[in-house]
Amino acid sequence: MKKILAGVIFLGMSLVAAQAEEWKVGSITISAPFARASAGMANAGGGFMQISNEGEADRLIAASADVGHMTELHTHIKEGDVMRMRAVEAIDVPANGAVALKPGSFHVMFMKLKEPLKEGESFPLELTFEHAGKVTIEMPVAGVGAMNAPKM
């Protein structure tokens, strides 16, 4: 009986872990989130994810995390031969479409970090969508130069 109970608990925990890689709010699904570990004494970090929408057009209008004193939505803009990061008011999520927050493109910026982001750790990130509302996801921290979410 103890072995059966242990197996059921393990299976339940595995299903929770598998489901934790996606979060839904309204018609929005957030998947494959990750932040990069801090490099050296850096006091800022980036967060990335895939946002899919099965409904009407929406917009990501805010992000909030306690890892830093400021959290903003950003993009990269080419000015002449130089790529620069800039804050954006919102990130459009097209109707029945998707947007990727990825290195070199749209991303969440964590500024004035309270402590370095360390590979293998995670933290909560609250996302606010114009129509779908708020959802809190778990952001795993991948390696310094990571391009994809770590395998959990």
Image (spheres, rainbow, N blue to C red):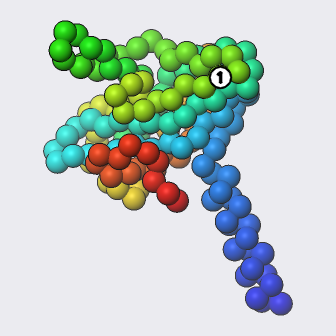
**Measured along the vertical axis of the image, is residue 24 above or below residue 16?**
above
Q: Check disc 1: other Cα within 10 Å, few if <14, some if 14-19, many if 20+.
A: some
**Measured along the vertical axis of the image, is residue 89 above or below residue 35?**
above
Residue at the outermost right position: 1
Q: Position of residue 147 (x, y in %)?
A: 38, 43
Q: Is residue 121 visible?
A: yes
Helix, strand or loop for disc 1: loop
Q: Residue 51: which quarter of the image?
A: top right
Q: Give, as a three-letter code, the residue at label 1.
A: Gly
Q: Position of residue 97 (x, y in %)?
A: 65, 22
Residue linked to disc 1: 97
- Residue drawn at the location 50% of the way across and 42% of the way down: 33
Left or right placement of residue 40 versus residue 76 in this view: left
Quarter occupied by the N terminus: bottom right
Given residues 20 and 97, the one toward you in this image is 97
Q: Is residue 134 visible?
A: no
Q: Position of residue 20 (x, y in %)?
A: 63, 51
Q: Position of residue 8 (x, y in %)?
A: 78, 75
Left or right placement of residue 129 versus residue 9 in this view: left
**Measured along the vertical axis of the image, is residue 104 above or below residue 7?**
above
- Residue drawn at the location 27% of the way across and 35% of the way down: 44
- Residue drawn at the location 32% of the way across and 20% of the way down: 76
